[in-house]
Image (tube, rainbow, N blue to C red):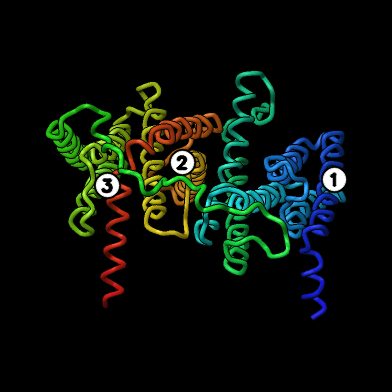
Amino acid sequence: MDRDKLSKLLLNTYRNTILSWMILLCLVLLTFVSFMDGRYTWGILSAFAICIIILPGSFFKDLSIMPPWYLLVLVALPIVGNAIDYHLFSTSIPHYVSVATIALLAAAEINWFTSVKMDHKFAILFVFITTLAISGLWYLMQWLLDINIGTSFILDGRSQETINTEVMYEFMYATVAGIVAGLIFGWYFGYKGRSAPSGIRFPSKDEQDIPAYTSTRPPEPIRKLLGISQKKQELATRVMQACLLIMMFAGIYLKDTHVVLNAIAAFGITFVPNVLTRKYYISLDPSLTLWITLAVFLDALGTLSFYETVARWDHLTHALSASVIAAAGYVIIRAIDIYTDDLYIPPRFMFVFILLFVLAAGVIWEILEFLTDEMVVKFEMEAFLTQHGISDTMRDMLFDLLGALAVAAWGTAYLSDISYRIARRIESFSASRNEK
């Protein structure tokens, strides 16, 4: 009973504002201390946390609008711990704990202070991918500064492979931190629900202010953008499928397992649209099928020494593959958005989500490549996924980001057509289950 009374007392708007501002001022002080001591990573993290905390009050021009104090305590804990005894924080693991807690706070504020609506599953996903995306973007920005300005944040004289190994472990730490933070927020989200904590003043969400994003007429399919006839698109897809079969037999003849495995995997992926059509009655536009086929075809073709002999081939395939991943993420989330009232993702937030989604996917892919390389060395197997140092990894992520930007820029205009089809299929499937 005493705990309930204390909780109600602390969640009062006035007291929550006072506590939140006290925590905020503490973070401001720790930010200056971190920069003065040369701990720039912690200084940047705490400064970023401060910006997220004050953003709602600044936007609504009301200093009493603050996130719940207990979320700010969670964000401040790793920063305060570092300031108290930074020697215990010599590893980078606490960095990602801090990034994960900041991502958790950002997800909560987005849900409470904007028109975005999240269910608890999407909240878990958002916290997880945000943590990974920030870790990937952090190292990408440091690498870009090193090669363009001459700094030594990453490229500090050590070998490319040594630096790459260290960054891969950093990414794995971020993955664990993101999973834990996502589960914590998912538990909290499920416990509290979508509404803001009672007793704290939050600006109300007027549903009438939300634009009719999901009720507008679906845009034209992607084939209108390409300007190529449907027959020509289907023909191009079939030609590439035939080439993949030829590559597979050539690999068998040459006894090249790498070529055979990549050709088989690519050939199988090209039939995913057919499976969606026949099993789930979701017909894909021929342009989407061509897009997917082109991405896997060029990747498989690269195994025929194109990656080694053709400049920028790896960059081309990464950008194209990233665009397919971004499109898949957009289509699925948009379809769920259309189908359910528990999720609302406006276009501007969808733009950001696509970028975060692809950056997180890029981090996971690089981790898989690294672990595969380690397994190949340990068991003396033939390599089929390889990394070539930190610069190769960072260039891959840079072109991943470029591919995601392309989709984020025009995904709303040309990909919603398939999202509406999937949403209708989900609705009919749910209706048939309810009838049973």
**Left or right of 135 in this view: 371:** left
In 3D space, how far apart are the residues under numbered discs 2 and 3 (Cα atoms)?
A: 29 Å
In 3D space, how far apart are the residues under numbered discs 1 and 3 (Cα atoms)?
A: 53 Å
Residue 344, position as x, y percentages in the image: 47, 52
Q: Secondary structure at mark 1?
A: helix
What residue lies at 15% left-to-right and 30% top-to-bottom? 229
Q: Amino acid at mark 3?
A: Ile
Residue 264, position as x, y percentages in the image: 25, 46
Q: Amino acid at mark 1?
A: Leu
**Label 1 crowd (10 A; few <14 / some 14-19 / many >=20):** few
Q: Amino acid at mark 2?
A: Pro
Q: Is residue 403 above or below residue 117?
A: above
**Label 2 crowd (10 A; few <14 / some 14-19 / many >=20):** some
What residue lies at 86% left-to-right and 33% top-to-bottom? 36
Badge nearest the viewer, 2 or 1: 2
Viewer-closest of 427 and 140: 427
Task: Say which mark, if any, is on residue 347.
Answer: 2
Q: Secondary structure at mark 3?
A: helix
**Label 3 crowd (10 A; few <14 / some 14-19 / many >=20):** some
What residue lies at 60% left-to-right and 41% top-to-bottom? 134
Residue 261, position as x, y percentages in the image: 29, 46
Q: Secondary structure at mark 2?
A: helix
Badge nearest the viewer, 2 or 3: 2
Task: Say which mark, if any, is on residue 25.
Answer: 1
Residue tagged 3 = 269
Badge nearest the viewer, 1 or 3: 1
In 3D space, how far apart are the residues under numbered discs 2 and 1 (Cα atoms)?
A: 34 Å
What residue lies at 41% left-to-right and 41% top-to-bottom? 326
